[in-house]
Image (spheres, rainbow, N blue to C red):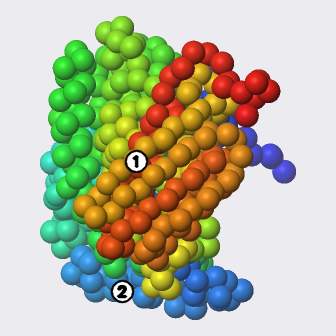
Amino acid sequence: MTRPLPLESYTWPPSNEELAARVGLTPSDMIRFDGNVPAAPPASARPAALARALADVNEYDRGRHEPLRRAIAKYHGLDVAQVALGAGSDEFIVLLARIFANGGTVATVPSRSYSMYRYAAIMAGATMVDDPSRADLVFVCRPNNPTGELVDVPDVAGQLVIDEAYAHYAGVDALDHLERGAIILRTFSKAFGLAGARVGYALASTQSIEVITSRQAPLSVSTLSAALALAAIATPPDVSEQVAERERLARELTELGLEPVPSFTNFLFVPMPNPSDLVERLLPYGLVTRAFGDGWRVSVRDEVDDDVLLDALRAELRGATPSSALVRHRRATAETILRVRLRPRGEGRVYVATGEGFYDHMLSQLAFHGGMDLRLEGVGDLETGDHHLVEDMMRAFGEALDRALGDRRGIARYGEARVPMDEAIAHAVVDLSGRAVSELDIDPDPGMATHAFESLAQTARITLHVTASGRNAHHVAEAAFKAVGRALAAAMTPSGSLVRSTKGSL
């Protein structure tokens, strides 16, 4: 027996743990600009979406995930028999190379495109050719990775496969080519924000889908992944904000002397010599970007993450002083998933969105009056009430604040504030003591204000005294949250270089 040798294969970039160790950071400090995925998962990706699938996880899915296939078919206006599911679109790329180009020829349009097409050809024993008209199998990456361009679909004699992984961001599709025998690939990894779930699908004629599924391993998509995809497609993604952010980021990069190629995707490609040098220079900031032979590629995330990137670029390219570090924290429980990005001494740029309107507003008031930059987003089980979500949003904020404060060195430690709100008045005193103590008298309490402050004190490890009173519960709570924010701002005021304790530590 001749033992097979390894093939040249797709190489994944290093993990956050490996990269962080190289530059003396923690894995949570790393921001991945190299994966072309959104900054956050969809709101539908929460424990409740998996509850039914988990209850039946001991069973196989006997219908090849028919509800998901029907939902995909309806989404595209096709018949369910025209849909095949796979473990990401990469499964189909490899499979189609074996079906249509086994020992034959493969071409890509444009000629420089997603590297997985070449690796699929290698696995199929196929030869890559430059001329699509001579290829048995032609992959058209539309829009193209890594350049972001939107190419025309050619007329070819071989099997045409149109990879639309980034089509949401271009606002176009090639579904009309299905009638001409094309196979279209889509994925839940990009606009739908489910890269970790590994769900992709192929759209084609009924006959082509029969050919494809007859050669697939049975049930390559797990029931858990199918449940997440089904929940996501029930509320299709709106990428308008990310497209607007792409254009903003492109303008900012241009002002820095970089010249990104016009993009129809969720990333930008910047031609430059020696892009690896820029990748290495950004790594100590916790920023992971991607170098190609003749250019630098960066994913478009959201304004907060992209501003961290721009700040680092200004420091490296213009010698500007970088902003203070942004603390990143995630809290995930069976009831809630929350993501926090916090700069305690910021400019009052605040965005809190959990679906719990009143306490979103209250925490926004606290952060704004505390002079913080805060972006806190997530979802929770509001169908059971607001208790879990309010508690966890304050605990998540407190955990992030605790990390940001570190050993409490070089700050005033104590802070006090009084805030009136119409007929209500609140008094807050804060000690960044490292000890979780709260003495609270909020009357009337709108429901969760007292518990919210208890949760904050516990996780931020602070001593917090609050008294607030008035006739209107909303005004009482708002005065209290504003007062706590102002007291925290005073306590975090820079003051020398010592820990303000005779013990030498808090």
Q: CA distance from mark 1 to mark 2?
A: 58 Å
Residue 411, horizontal then vertical, whole percent:
56, 26
Q: Residue furthest bottom?
A: 62
Q: Residue at x 17, y 29 (%)?
A: 251
Quarter-of-image position of residue 500? top right
Residue 492 in view, yes or no: yes
The secondary structure type at the circle numbered 2 is: helix
Mark 1 or mark 2: name the one nearer the start of the chain. Answer: 2
Q: Residue at x 19, y 20 (%)?
A: 255
Q: Is residue 20 above or below residue 467?
A: above
Q: Nearer the viewer, residue 246 or 198?
A: 246
Q: Is residue 267 left or right of residue 459?
A: left
Q: Is residue 419 above or below residue 285?
A: below
Badge 1 vs badge 2, beta-carbon distance below 8 Å: no
Residue 212 in view, yes or no: no
Residue 333, horizontal then vertical, whole percent:
61, 67
Residue 229, horizontal then vertical, whole percent:
44, 73
Q: Nearer the viewer, mark 1 or mark 2?
A: 1
Classify mark 2: residues with Cα within 10 Å, few (<14), some (14-19) or many (20+).
some
Residue 213, horizontal then vertical, whole percent:
48, 77
Judging by the rendered image, the residue that carries numbered circle 2 is: 70
- Residue 418's disc number: 1
Quadrant of the rendering where the C terminus is positioned: top right
Amino acid type of the residue tagged 2 in the rendering: Arg
Q: Is residue 220 left or right of residue 107?
A: right
